[in-house]
Amino acid sequence: MSAINITADDILYAESILKCSFDKERRDFIKNLETIDLQAVPGSGKTTALLAKLLILDRYLPFNNGSGILVISHTNVAVDEIKGKIGKHCKNLFKYPNYVGTIQSFVDKFLCIPYYSNKNGVKPNRIDNEICDDYILKFLNMSKNFGLISWLNRKHSPQNFLSNLEIDENKDLRIIGGTSESFELKDKTKATYKGLLNFVINRDKAGFVRYETAFSLAQKYIASNELCAALLQNRFKMVFVDEMQDMAQHQYTVLEKLFYNNGTANSIFQRIGDNNQAIFENDSNNNHWVNRDRVLKIEGSHRLSSNVAGIVTKFAIAPIEIKGNHSSTIKPHIIVYDDNSISSVIEEYAKLIKTFFASGAMINSTDNKYVAIGWRKSNDKGITITSYFNNYQEQDLSNKKDFDTFNDYLFSADEMNEVVNVNKIRSRIINAFLKFLRNENILTNDSRYYTRTSFIEKIKSNGQNFEDSFNRNLFAWVCDIIKKESPLSKIRNFIETELLQLFSEKTDIVNSDFFAIKQSNLQIELNGLKSNIFSYDGIDIEIGTVHSVKGKTNAATLYLETFYQGKYESERLKDSFSGKNFSDSNKAHSVQASKMVYVGFSRPTHLLAVAIHKDRFNELSLQEKIWEVRNIAN
């Protein structure tokens, strides 16, 4: 591949499309085409700088040796953002040999599926945790091997045990990550061992793979085939990973083995993110992202004011000096409360926002977001989010693909989005059909559950008229959902009068729970999304967790101290609150707390407020010139 030299004119081209201007820090990153790490502070616009680099490189694709670019992010939302912002300007980036996707989709497509297919002779039916769990639950409830079920039920979690069970190259049982020698059942002639072996064989034949198992299979593929890494390096000469700090250990390991390999890999591998924001890894003290020899930094933040940036800097685990470039001059505030006034904290925060509207320090705009966030949702031992806002409802709708009822598929969480995505609605409806077929144990001719591909092929197999009728119905159902009208009764009629005849099946769907219109868990969660709002005099404040706002920008943020493992943030992080750099890296809970505060404090453009109980506030040595205090304690 001949050398590419990114020029000032190239950057002007990217700036004209992205409607922004890049300073020296960002230009240095855009021009750099070596294996490096980029550590970028909150609000730095690092993803925009990456988009600029991709816009420029698109004009060189494919490279003259036929290779391309791999772009990996952590979530589908991030991938959609990349495609949405530069897709129409890139003629090549979203075509072969390039690939833009999540870490999971990359591993599935290039590693797990090829390895699984070679090993089992068939492709995986579906890589999805919930569907695997469905299969296991059905086995536990319907198996006639009562001795095996009795043995499994003595385990702490039979479902987790079966999820982590696999067969090694010698056809012996083992737990993923273990060996057949360490497997607890030693006698392979016993009915229990044979029953487990048959379960794994049938599960693999059915083709269900958990997300975590996909990475285990990927590592086996890399280890067993020396050409695997070489071929991927030859295809992807440049690899960009955004939000690297959010990668779990098993994800990090796969990427390192493929595209770095202790510095011997042929790919240019750039990792982009902020180590200080690694709050999604279970072990927050396990900083497996170790910087390369060469590290670029973007220390200027478009989001943060100098007042807030100076405070956030003190909570950084990996030292970095944040330079706040936002023009706001509002000082950070501490709301001091006591046991009797804790329920008034969020209202006081709302009043504080109103005062800055009145003074002109903040503009009252419908585009502004105001949030109150905490680390811990609820427990019985200390103050949590529910202590401040007792109507708080927990929800977790992230990446949910599998639901309890047909109606939940039709009206899942992304109906809350303002932008209608017809393809996603269509996809949800087809996923609902697949769930129905699984529930009724309607299988393909080779005794596998239907996939999207095999389902569509089955529809087509009944002739052009039936295919056209199905597509017309599908379009009409999508239109109903867009209008917020449920097409469930129409779909039930279609299944009863047409679809079941295609499969030569008879089943009673009238009394099926899957077709019930009820307040399912999803609907409760959606109601929770709507109800986690505190309204005061025209201001709506969203109540949530630190995790829920990561990567987002708000006009004002209230950080609610919460109790975790015996202490509150203001107790664990006294020195940082007092203006000293974080130094307790050897204390795991302090590291976790500091990362939470770093992420939570770095969300607002204008107002940062922190709620601290008066007993803990009195133990702090705050610098008055930095903090403004509002006391609502009696």
Image: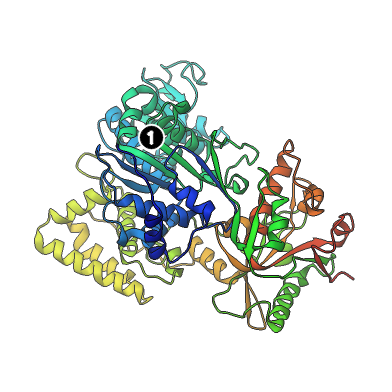
154 to the left or right of 223: right
Q: Where is residue 363 drawn, in percent x and y?
A: 62, 79
Q: Quadrant of the N terminus?
A: top left
Mark 1 Cα shell of 10 Å, populated few (<14), some (14-19), many (≥20): many
Residue farthest toward the front in the current orientation of the protein:
8
Task: Identify the residue under disc 1.
Answer: 267
Viewer-proximal residue, 168 or 25?
A: 25
Q: Where is residue 378 drawn, in percent x and y?
A: 69, 56
Which of the 4 image quadrants contains residue 527?
bottom right
Q: Residue at x 54, y 57 (%)?
A: 396
**Residue type, numbered disc 1:** Ser
Q: Residue at x 35, y 35 (%)?
A: 112
Which of the 4 image quadrants contains residue 218?
top left
> Considering only vertical position in the picture, is 571 above or below 307?
above
Q: Where is residue 597 drawn, in percent x and y?
A: 69, 54
Q: Where is residue 66 drawn, in percent x and y?
A: 24, 39
Q: Quadrant of the C terminus?
A: bottom right
> Considering only vertical position in the picture, is 556 above or below 384?
below
Viewer-proximal residue, 443 or 402?
A: 402
Viewer-proximal residue, 186 or 305?
A: 305
- Residue 278 visible somewhere in the drawing: yes
Q: Residue at x 48, y 48 (%)?
A: 29
Callout 1: SS: loop
Which of the 4 image quadrants contains residue 84?
bottom left
Q: How many marks?
A: 1
